[in-house]
Image (spheres, rainbow, N blue to C red):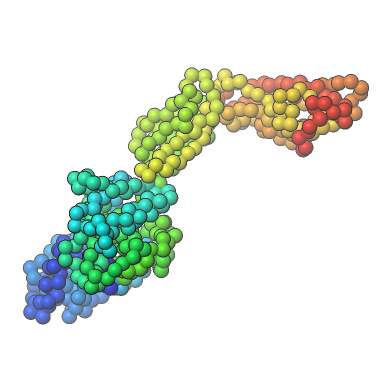
Amino acid sequence: MKYQSRIIILFLVPMLTFLSCRRDLVEDESRLDEHTERISEIMALGFKREAIVDCGEDYYLVDECYLVPKKGDMYNRDKTSSAEGSKSIGSGKKGQLHTDERVYHNHIKMYIDNSMPTTGVDNWRNAIAASIGHINGVQNINLLIELTNNPADADITVSSDNGVLANNVLASASFPLPNGKPGNIINVNLDYNGNQTLNEGQKIHTFVHEIGHTLGLHHTNGSMYWPGHNLVPNTPQVDGNSVMNGGTAGHAWIGFSGYDIVALNYLFPGVTISGPGYICSSGTFNIPNAVRVELAGQTQTATIAKTGTNTYVLSRTGQNRGPVTINAFDWAGRVKSMTTNVAYASDPKYMLIPATLGQNYMNSGGGYHVSIDNSIPVTSCNWVVTGGNVVSGQGTNYMALQVNPNYGPGDQTITITANFSTPCDVSPNVISKTFIVRPAGTGGPGTPEDPI
């Protein structure tokens, strides 16, 4: 859309047509009654009849700002471009607004043609690269914009306006196309405001704004009641810091507002992973918006394969077990990860005593925590302690025990038995382990305790 001191919405016509129309307003007014139905539709938006001027065979000029086609879709929303400014068609609720057409092309290539200088004050190339970097840097969006040197590969072409834009119009951009691609044109007025010199911050603000239009963002301070202006969920009615506010030509770049980021997240949702926290032999994971999905170097434990648009199946390899991390990448190379556990019914099970791991000793009267080392959840567990007592955790895989005190001279023993089940087991598992109990205060390998 076009940056200037007021919004001008152009429907399928170039700016030169608009300018010549404005010069001929008076002599065209006699033709107002030819399309009374369309005039009534425009007046229903709140405009007075005298504000609707005939502009020849195809268009009306409304309120000296908006060109509306006489035939077909009044808004021609698929092929509209607009200029930034201080007023918009219609009135009412404002906020983060997006077009009807959504961009589903997540890898966008942009070409800067030879009409854009490479040196001097009219060189926008560094600002364009910086603007692309700011958008690519937004977290949790699945979007990558890259510059290309091949115009045939370009989704968006950046050009000088070649004198078409009015003096007070800084830049223009087209809206998304019906085929899911972004608007394909951004024009820059290199003679803006009598050849005003713009610094890099002003250029970046302008260009981020124009890219936003090609991605489907309207002016934040526009009206959601104008057809094709749809409110982004969870955004407020007013966002004074939004880079997409109209009427901000010449403003310096200060970054995206929080709700700008909400809007980009809504239009280009990032990669997510959902699925089971463990698998016995295989499991299905939902991973939308990913460009690439792979395991983090654990192919000896499992493999992963795409089976649908967003579905992937993780399958156990042989009789291996253990944690497996799934990495899903977006277009910008950002990674979303999820770790799951791979197990099966014949997995060996282990009993862990954290403070005495690798030792076979406990202290008389000492307190310890005992757990089942298993790669999948324990659904039930019955603990039996001979030579001590279960303090807490009966029925779970994590139990606290107290060793019986007041043992006599010499070493004694304590036996801990767990009878438990898991979702991958056909029958219950039994693990039993015996420890030597030494009198309290005698030192030795069993001295460290795990307070309970």
At which x and y percent is residue 165?
Answer: 19, 67
Image coordinates of residue 30 in percent, x first then y, are 8, 79
Name the quarter where the C terminus is drawn: top right
User: Which residue is painted at 23% across and 65% down in the image?
Assistant: 190
Q: Position of residue 105 (x, y in %)?
A: 29, 46
Foreground pick, 168 / 75: 168
Residue 77 rendering spot, x and y as whole percentages = 22, 59
Quadrant of the snapshot with the N terminus: bottom left
**Picture residue at 34% right of the left edge, 56% below the top:** 131
The answer to whether residue 1 is seen in the rendering is: no
Locate residue 187 relative to residue 223 in the image: left or right: left
Quarter assignment of residue 197: bottom left
Q: Can residue 146 be seen in the rendering of this structure?
A: yes
226 vs 29: above or below: above
Q: Nearer the viewer, residue 355 or 378?
A: 355
Residue 151's place in the image compared with 24, above or below, is above
Please, is residue 78 above or below residue 381 in the view?
below
Count of labels in the image: 0
> Is 55 above or below relative to 113?
below
Q: Residue furthest front?
A: 120
